[in-house]
Amino acid sequence: MRVLIVEDERRLAENVARTLRESAGYAVDISTDGEEGLFLAESSSYDLILLDLLLPGLEGMRLLQRLRAGGNRTPVLVLTARDDKESTIAVLDAGGDDYLTKPFDLGELLARAKALIRRSRGQARPLLKVGDLEVNTHDRTASRAGEPVPLTAMEYRVLEYLAFRPNAVISKNELLEHLYDYNWEKFSNVIEVYVSGLRRKLEREGAPQLIHTQRGLGYVLRG
């Protein structure tokens, strides 16, 4: 999953980014300016946006309004120093999906971020099931037919993304866009390497194949 943080307090943004990377395995981009944040949100694919309201260049509320007016449906978790009822109503009415009042606990932010991403994918629970495959997004583990599947961090991220969209064709470009931040140099065959590793680890004698290749289109996770 890929997250955009639009926050002008650099230390806070970096602390949040580190938590998301280390505890959830998310790719994270940071912007400290509202205009740049809007550009990134409109030009890249994100699974969640963390948005401060008091930003230079373009204030957060205006950024949110412009995103929603343009049809962008990415979940937005607003970070605000205001805790009055009127401000909360304004955030939700502008299209915010949730909010946290500063100062906040990083553990709570992580839990809310995961919940927003799950709900945006139509999943209410942290356990994703595809056939006899189970992907636990809480502790970042996977099992098939009750047997644990040992995965590298990147293999898990690829599998989690596919599991959030079972039966859908996911292109290699989509996987790259959602699993890496904009500073990473994308190599053309890296996704094939991870998918190949996943197939080897997920295969069970006599069990149906889980990851299918749609030639020229991408991959499908199907039970």
Image (tube, helix red, strand yellow):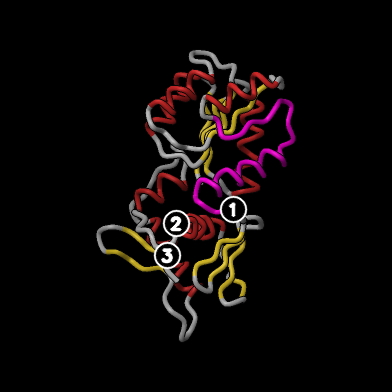
- In the image, taking residue 137 as reference, residue 81 lies left or right, namely right
Question: Of marks 3 and 1, which one's residue comes earlier in the chain?
Answer: 1
Left or right? Give the position of 94 relative to 141. Answer: left
Q: Label 3 amino acid?
A: Leu
On the image, the x and y values in percent for residue 13 come to: 62, 29
Percent position of residue 76, x then y: 54, 33
Of the residues under marks 1 and 2, which one precedes in the sequence?
Answer: 1
Label for residue 221?
Answer: 3
Q: Residues within 10 Å of mark 2 (few under 14, many from 20)?
A: some
> Quadrant location of residue 88?
top right
Helix, strand or loop for disc 1: loop
Q: Earlier in the sequence, mark 2 or mark 3?
A: 2
Residue underneath mark 1: 124
Query: In front here: 131 or 147?
Result: 131
Does the magenta portion include 121? yes
Q: Is residue 36 highlighted in magenta?
A: no
Residue that numbered label 2 is attached to: 165
Amino acid on which disc 1 is placed: Ala
Q: Label 1, label 2: how many angstroms apart (C-alpha)?
A: 14 Å
Q: Which residues are magenta?
A: 96-124
Task: Look at the numbered discs 2 and 3 and tell me whether their residues touch, using CB distance below 8 Å.
Answer: yes
State the residue at coordinates (74%, 26%). Answer: 103
Q: Amino acid at mark 2?
A: Arg
